[in-house]
Amino acid sequence: DQQVKQNSPSLSVQEGRISILNCDYTNSMFDYFLWYKKYPAEGPTFLISISSIKDKNEDGRFTVFLNKSAKHLSLHIVPSQPGDSAVYFCAASFASGTYKYIFGTGTRLKVLA
Amino acid sequence: KAGVTQTPRYLIKTRGQQVTLSCSPISGHRSVSWYQQTPGQGLQFLFEYFSETQRNKGNFPGRFSGRQFSNSRSEMNVSTLELGDSALYLCASSRSGQGNTEAFFGQGTRLTVV
């Protein structure tokens, strides 16, 4: 039972345009969400997070949007750069619980120069 | 500040053998978690340790075990290896291990079972 889903295995975007990566979850008790980026042969790197009390969080070129009623979050990258080409994982957790992330299966983003 | 260090980076083992992987967390971090990454499956949570105690465990068979030492370093052991255990094993550390904090990952150990 996949509680966190990333339905798009891959996405290609032109350099300078917006990249939108989507993530859906099924457990309404999740209250903290994160995005990680992973390059080949490296571990995942934390990008940005959002608490369920917010619907938007921005950090430079990265913005995460949370729609609790739809159980959906998205990561926007503007403008996209070739160095953003990587696999992006969304993860969900319980803020008050002990540490355990539930990850999606990832979306491979390719930014074309 | 040194990051999360995992050793070894690569391992090749034979079916039926056992293997031990090591993880040194960021200094000051007391929570260490382990994940298995396989193609198409994303990252699957194995277990989490905090101050030498296992606080959380994922849905893996008992062949997968771990421990944490007083200096927060952690080891993961897989006994009676199967071909399906071939994966990238990732370790992550965080200061408190609370669900609303980000964790920092190591580069992983690539295990190949033949």
Image (cartoon, rainbow, N blue to C red):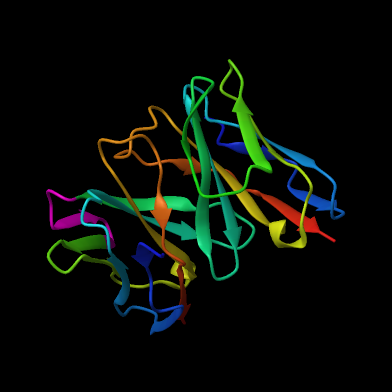
User: x and y percent of residue A52 in the render?
Assistant: 17, 51
Q: How far across and down, in percent of the image, does residue A78 sit? A: 28, 70
Q: Does A54 appear in magenta?
A: yes
Q: Residue at x 76, y 57 (%)?
A: B82
Q: Quadrant of the N terminus of chain A?
A: bottom left
Total numbered circles: 0
Q: Which residues are magenta?
A: A52-62
Up/down of B93 relative to B12, above or below? above
Residue at (13, 58) in percent of width and height = A55
- Left-right relation of B102 to A50: right
Position above or below: B37 against B53: below
Residue A97 appears at what percent x and percent y?
Answer: 30, 36
Residue A31 drawn at (x, y percent): 22, 48
Q: Nearer the viewer, residue B33 or A61?
A: B33
Task: Classify A74 as above or below A41.
Answer: below
Residue at 31%, 80% in the rendered image: A17
- In the rendered structure, the answer to whether residue A62 lies left or right of residue B104 reads left
Which residue lies at the image location 85% right of the left edge and 46% below the top edge? B17
Residue in front for this viewpoint, B28 or B99: B99
The answer to whether A62 appears left or right of B80 in the picture is left
Viewer-closest of B47 and A82: B47
